[in-house]
Image: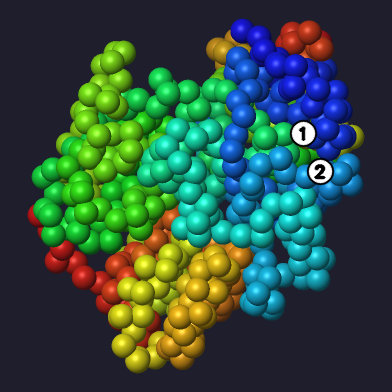
C-alpha cells in the first residue's frame, strides 16, 4: 500500500510553504508510511503535547522549527509544560532545566500556538464538533475529543503533533476513518446501583478497570444514566487512557456516535460482552490506592485532568470556610484560574489553603513537598502515575474524602457506597 | 524496515514490551522501570529485540534523547511495528543526529540465536551473524 499525496501535499513537501513546513511534512509523510496510511487528511485543529520538557532534544526540535520560520497552519492549543509560568518558584528545578523547559514552551507559542498549557483544552472553549478531523495529543484529551465530542483523532504524541499543526494535515488512518470507530466490546454496567453511578468517585474506578480490561479496543458502555456529567466522562476517559490505550469509548444514549446499539456496534465479526461485577469494581478501586495502611497523608492533589470550573464550584461548596492542615494542590488551566479570579472565588480558595497549580501539574514536574510520602487524590490518573513519577504512595477517595482528610491530615474514606 | 540503516551489535532480547518514557534513563540507557523484567539492563549499543512498545507517546522524545546522548541501541528489532519509537529516530535524522535502524521482524526469526550473539543489520534489512 502506498501513500498517495495530493498536489498541495507535494508543494508543502518541496518547500512551497517554507522550510519548517517542509521539515514537518517530511516527518509526517514518513510517519504516514509507517502507519500504512493511504493519504493525508486535512485537520481543523491541533493540540500539541510536545511542549513538556523531557530533555534538550525536544527544545532543539521546537527551536529548529522556529528558526526555519515555522507557524501553525490550524488553530492549535498547547498541553501542559514543565513549569507553572504564573507561579514561578512553585516547581523545583535547577536554573538550566528551568531555562530549557521555558524555551520549549516559548518556542511553540512563537509558532502561533495558543498558550493554553492545559491537558483539557475542551473545557476552556476548544471543542471540535462531531466528525471534525483533528490531530490532538495528550491521552485524556484524545479520549474526550473522540468519545464525548465525536471529533476524530488518533493518538498523537511528541513531534508528530507539531508536524500535524504546522502542515494542517494528519495521516488518514485509524480513528480518522468512520469504520474504525465501531465498538467491538460491550460493557454492561446496568447492575451497578444507581446511587454509585451518580457519584463522581465511581468514574475513575470504572475507567481504571476499562483500560486494564480492554487495552486499545473500542468499548460501548451500556447502562450509564443519561445524567452522567462531562466531568464524569472526562475522569472515565482519563483513567482508561492511563491503564490502557483507550482513545475512544462510546456510551449508549449519551455520546454522539452511540444513539442506538445498531449505530455503533461493529457488524464484522464477534462482539465481546462483559457485565461489570462487584469484584471487578473492587479490584480496580484497590489498584488506585498503594498506601493501604496509611492513616496519615502529607498532601492532597486534584485536577488531573485539569480541574474544571464546575469541579471548583463543588470544591468551594465543600470547604465552607474551613482551613486545610496540609498542602492541597488544585491543578488547572490558566483560563480557568482567570475565571475563578473574576468570580471572586480565588481568594476563598487561597484562604482555605488551596494552592492553585496552573500550566502544569504535580505528576509531570516536581511540585509536591520533598519530605512527604503519601498523597491523597480523587483523580484516577494521579493515582496511576503518582507512585512512579513522584515517589509518593497514593490514597484514592472522593473529592469529599480529600477535603475532609486535608482538614486534619488523617485519612477519611467513605467505604459504604462500594458494597453492592 | 521501519527506519533503514546498517548496524552491528550484540543481541539483547527484552522479556516484555517497554515504554521508553519512564522505562529507560536516556542519560545512561539503563532500564529503570522496576516492574520490567529486564530492570537494570543497559540497552546502549545493543541490537535490541522487543516484543512491542507500550505506554506514553512521549517515548518518541526519549528515543531522540537516547540518540543525542549516544545511549541508544545499535538497532531495534520489533515484533510489532510502533510508529512512536520510529518517529524519534526520524526526528533525530532531521536534526542531524545519529540514527539507528528499526526493523519489524517476527521475533521467532531469532529463535536459536543465543543471547549476546553479534549481529549485523544490513541496509537491505537483513539480519546476519558475521
Quadrant of residue B77 in the image?
Answer: top right
Q: Residues within 10 Å of mark 2 (few under 14, many from 20)?
A: many
Question: Which numbered disc covers residue A70?
Answer: 2
Q: Give the number of callouts.
A: 2
Q: Residues within 10 Å of mark 1 (few under 14, many from 20)?
A: many
Q: In which quadrant will I find the N terminus of chain A?
A: top right
Residue A341 is situated, as x and y percent measured from the top left of the image, at 52, 80
- Dot 2 or dot 1: first in sequence order is 1
Visible in this render: residue B50?
A: no
Q: Residue at coordinates 86% horizontally, 35% vertically from top-left? A: A18
Q: Is residue A169 left or right of residue A380?
A: right
Q: Residue at coordinates 34% horizontally, 54% vertically from top-left? A: A230
Q: Residue at coordinates 57% horizontally, 32% vertically from top-left? A: B53
Q: Are marks 2 and 1 in contact (CB under 8 Å)?
A: yes
Q: Is residue A294 above or below residue B68?
A: below
Chain ID at mark 1: A
Residue A354 is situated, as x and y percent measured from the top left of the image, at 47, 82
Question: Which numbered disc covers residue B122?
Answer: none
Which residue is identified by label 1?
Answer: A24
Q: Which element carries disc 2, helix, strand or loop?
A: loop
Q: Is residue A233 left or right of residue A117?
A: left
Amino acid at each position: 500500500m502506498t501513500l498517495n499525496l495530493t498536489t498541495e501535499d507535494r508543494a508543502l513537501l518541496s518547500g512551497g510553504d517554507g522550510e519548517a513546513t517542509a521539515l514537518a511534512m517530511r516527518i509526517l509523510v514518513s510517519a504516514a508510511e509507517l502507519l500504512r496510511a493511504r493519504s493525508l487528511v486535512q485537520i481543523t485543529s491541533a493540540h500539541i503535547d510536545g511542549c513538556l520538557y523531557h530533555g534538550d532534544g525536544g527544545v532543539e526540535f521546537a527551536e529548529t522549527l522556529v528558526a526555519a520560520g515555522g507557524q501553525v497552519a490550524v488553530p492549535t492549543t498547547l498541553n501542559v509544560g514543565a513549569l507553572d509560568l504564573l507561579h514561578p518558584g512553585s516547581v523545583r528545578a535547577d536554573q538550566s532545566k528551568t531555562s530549557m523547559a521555558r524555551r520549549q514552551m516559548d518556542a511553540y507559542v512563537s509558532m502561533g500556538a495558543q498558550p493554553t498549557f492545559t491537558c483539557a483544552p475542551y473545557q476552556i472553549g476548544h471543542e471540535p464538533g462531531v466528525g471534525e478531523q483533528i490531530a490532538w495529543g495528550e491521552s485524556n484529551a484524545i479520549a474526550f475529543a473522540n468519545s464525548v465530542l465525536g471529533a476524530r483523532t488518533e493518538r498523537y504524541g511528541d513531534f508528530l503533533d507539531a508536524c500535524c499543526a504546522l502542515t494542517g494535515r494528519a495521516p488518514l488512518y485509524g480513528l480518522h476513518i468512520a469504520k474504525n470507530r465501531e465498538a467491538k466490546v460491550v460493557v454492561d454496567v446496568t447492575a451497578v446501583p444507581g446511587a454509585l453511578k451518580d457519584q463522581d468517585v465511581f468514574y475513575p474506578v470504572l475507567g481504571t478497570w476499562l483500560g486494564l480490561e480492554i487495552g486499545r479496543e473500542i468499548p460501548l458502555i451500556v447502562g450509564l444514566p443519561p445524567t452522567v456529567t462531562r466531568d464524569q466522562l472526562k475522569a472515565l476517559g482519563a483513567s482508561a487512557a492511563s491503564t490502557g490505550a483507550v482513545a475512544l469509548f462510546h456510551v449508549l444514549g449519551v455520546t454522539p456516535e452511540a444513539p442506538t446499539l445498531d449505530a455503533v456496534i461493529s457488524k464484522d465479526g464477534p462482539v465481546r460482552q462483559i457485565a461489570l461485577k462487584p469484584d471487578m469494581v473492587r479490584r480496580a478501586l484497590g489498584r488506585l490506592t498503594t498506601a493501604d495502611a496509611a492513616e496519615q497523608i502529607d498532601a492532597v492533589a486534584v485536577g488531573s485532568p485539569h480541574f474544571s470550573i464546575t469541579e471548583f464550584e463543588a470544591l468551594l461548596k465543600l470547604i465552607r470556610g474551613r482551613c486545610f492542615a496540609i498542602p492541597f494542590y488544585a491543578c488547572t488551566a490558566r483560563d480557568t484560574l482567570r475565571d475563578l479570579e473574576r468570580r471572586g472565588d480565588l481568594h476563598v480558595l487561597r484562604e482555605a489553603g488551596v494552592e492553585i497549580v496552573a500550566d502544569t501539574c504535580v505528576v509531570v514536574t516536581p511540585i509536591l513537598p520533598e519530605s512527604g510520602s503519601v498523597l491523597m487524590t480523587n483523580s484516577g490518573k494521579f493515582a496511576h502515575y503518582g507512585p512512579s513519577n513522584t515517589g509518593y504512595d497514593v490514597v484514592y477517595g472522593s473529592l469529599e474524602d480529600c477535603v475532609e482528610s486535608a482538614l486534619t491530615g488523617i485519612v477519611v474514606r467513605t467505604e459504604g457506597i462500594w458494597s453492592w | 524496515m521501519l527506519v533503514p540503516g546498517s548496524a552491528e551489535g550484540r543481541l539483547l532480547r527484552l522479556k516484555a514490551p517497554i515504554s521508553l518514557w519512564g522505562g529507560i534513563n536516556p542519560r545512561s540507557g539503563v532500564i529503570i522501570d522496576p516492574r520490567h523484567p529486564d530492570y537494570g539492563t543497559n540497552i546502549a549499543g545493543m541490537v535490541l529485540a522487543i516484543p512491542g512498545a507500550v505506554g506514553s507517546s512521549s517515548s518518541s522524545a526519549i528515543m531522540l534523547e537516547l540518540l543525542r546522548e549516544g545511549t541508544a541501541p545499535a538497532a531495534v528489532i520489533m515484533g510489532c511495528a510502533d510508529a512512536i519509537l520510529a518517529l524519534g529516530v526520524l526526528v533525530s535524522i532531521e536534526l542531524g543526529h545519529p540514527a539507528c535502524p528499526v526493523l519489524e521482524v517476527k521475533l521467532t526469526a531469532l529463535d536459536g540465536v543465543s543471547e549476546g550473539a553479534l549481529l549485523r543489520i544490513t541496509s537491505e534489512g537483513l539480519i546476519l551473524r558475521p
